């Protein structure tokens, strides 16, 4: 009986916390369906008296919001592909290939994760702007704009991150070393050992990395804002900022756009939840 009471109390507390965490989402959804005169009403009117979809229509007609979604989706998917492939290759090398400086390089990689991303904004911008033979630059990276205002300015800096390498290395360390040794005895090339033997066993880690990378790419705002000037190249987060202007905010379209921008991440979590849980549970035990 005591155990039942404790379990009921625990579930009650967790339910309360869950409802509190859902309140911002519920307010956003409610606001996106309210007429303008009910959005800022006091007290808050959680259920719209006359639900309307005009804010969704305005969000897609006042700005090219569909183009923003396509840009963010492209950046996020390309980032997932490059981080999963390159992160897995680098993680496998650190975990399974003995070479001079392995530990030192990996420690430097871990140290780079301690540097706040905002600190690297200026150096990254200078590197992108000074890329040789691009954007009118000469061989020494002078005279032009480099990769600025190009999709490559967002894709290349985010092609692979230290977290991707760290995550995959930790997962490869937990896999049996005997699998690779047996394949080497049979004359299997190293890349085939990685691709056909180890990589299929890494689905939980790959799914975890894909989810985190997609979220980072989908929610990217500051870096694309710095390197992209063409409105047609803007991301969905930059598009949401367009609804705040002249010290005022158009809450209806902003909340409507936010709900639409939230859908891909929610769907991703629904389909990848099983692999994501396993990846977090089995990665980083060493």
Image (tube, grey):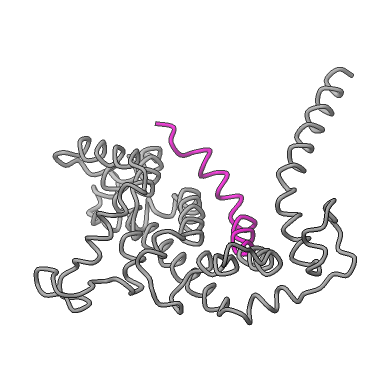
x then y, percent, for residue 133: 15, 75
Residue sitting at 22 percent across and 77 percent down?
135
The range drawn in magenta is: 262-286
Q: Nearer the viewer, residue 233 or 169?
A: 233
Q: Quadrant of residue 240?
A: bottom right
Query: Seen from this angle, which residue lies furthest left?
Result: 139
Image-quadrant location for residue 79: bottom left
| Relative image position of residue 193 (x, y in whole percent) | 31, 53
Asked whether, in this view, residue 198 is left or right of residue 146, the answer is right
Look at the magenta stretch and give its main secondary structure.
helix
Location of the C terminus by quadrant is: top left
Q: Can residue 65 be found in the magenta stretch?
A: no
The total of numbered circles placed on residues is: 0
Q: Residue furthest top?
A: 2
**Left or right of 276, for residue 194:** left
Does residue 163 sit above or below 220 in this rendering? Answer: above
Q: Quadrant of the N terminus?
A: top right
Residue 277 colored magenta?
yes
From the viewer's perspective, tell me whether residue 14 is left or right of residue 8. Answer: left
> Quadrant of residue 150 in the image?
bottom left
Whole-percent x, y for residue 50 in the image: 88, 70
At a point 11% along the width and 75% down the height, the residue shown is 138
- Residue occupying image coordinates x 86% and y 17%: 2
Residue pushed farthest bottom?
61
Q: Left or right of 23: which side holds 125?
A: left
Percent from the top left, x then y, of residue 83?
38, 57
Q: Toward the viewer: 153 or 275?
A: 153
> At 32% from the left edge and 54% from the top edge, which residue is drawn?
121
């Amino acid at each position: 009986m005591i155990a039942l009471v404790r379990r009921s109390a625990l579930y009650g507390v967790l339910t309360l916390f869950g409802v509190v965490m859902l309140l911002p989402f519920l307010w956003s959804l409610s606001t996106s369906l309210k007429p303008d005169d009910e959005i800022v009403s006091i007290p808050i009117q959680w259920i719209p008296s006359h639900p309307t979809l005009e804010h969704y229509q305005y969000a897609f007609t006042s700005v090219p919001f569909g183009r923003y979604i396509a840009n963010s989706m492209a950046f996020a998917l390309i980032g997932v592909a490059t981080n999963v492939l390159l992160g897995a290759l680098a993680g496998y090398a650190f975990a399974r290939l003995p070479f001079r400086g392995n530990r030192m390089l990996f420690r430097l990689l871990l140290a780079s994760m301690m540097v706040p991303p905002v600190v690297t904004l200026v150096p990254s911008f200078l590197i992108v702007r000074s890329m040789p033979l691009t954007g009118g630059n000469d061989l020494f990276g002078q005279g032009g704009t480099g990769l600025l205002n190009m999709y490559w300015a967002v894709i290349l800096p985010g092609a692979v991150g230290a977290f991707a390498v760290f995550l995959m290395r930790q997962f490869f360390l937990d896999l049996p070393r005997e699998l690779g040794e047996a394949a080497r005895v049979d004359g299997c090339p190293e890349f085939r050992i990685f691709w056909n033997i180890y990589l299929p066993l890494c689905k939980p880690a790959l799914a975890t990395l894909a989810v985190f990378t997609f979220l980072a790419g989908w929610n990217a705002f500051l870096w694309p804002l710095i390197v992209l000037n063409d409105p047609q190249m803007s991301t969905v987060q930059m598009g949401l900022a367009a609804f705040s202007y002249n010290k005022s905010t158009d809450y209806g379209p902003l909340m409507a756009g936010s709900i639409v921008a939230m859908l891909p991440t929610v769907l991703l979590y629904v389909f990848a939840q099983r692999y994501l849980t396993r990846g977090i549970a089995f990665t980083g035990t060493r």
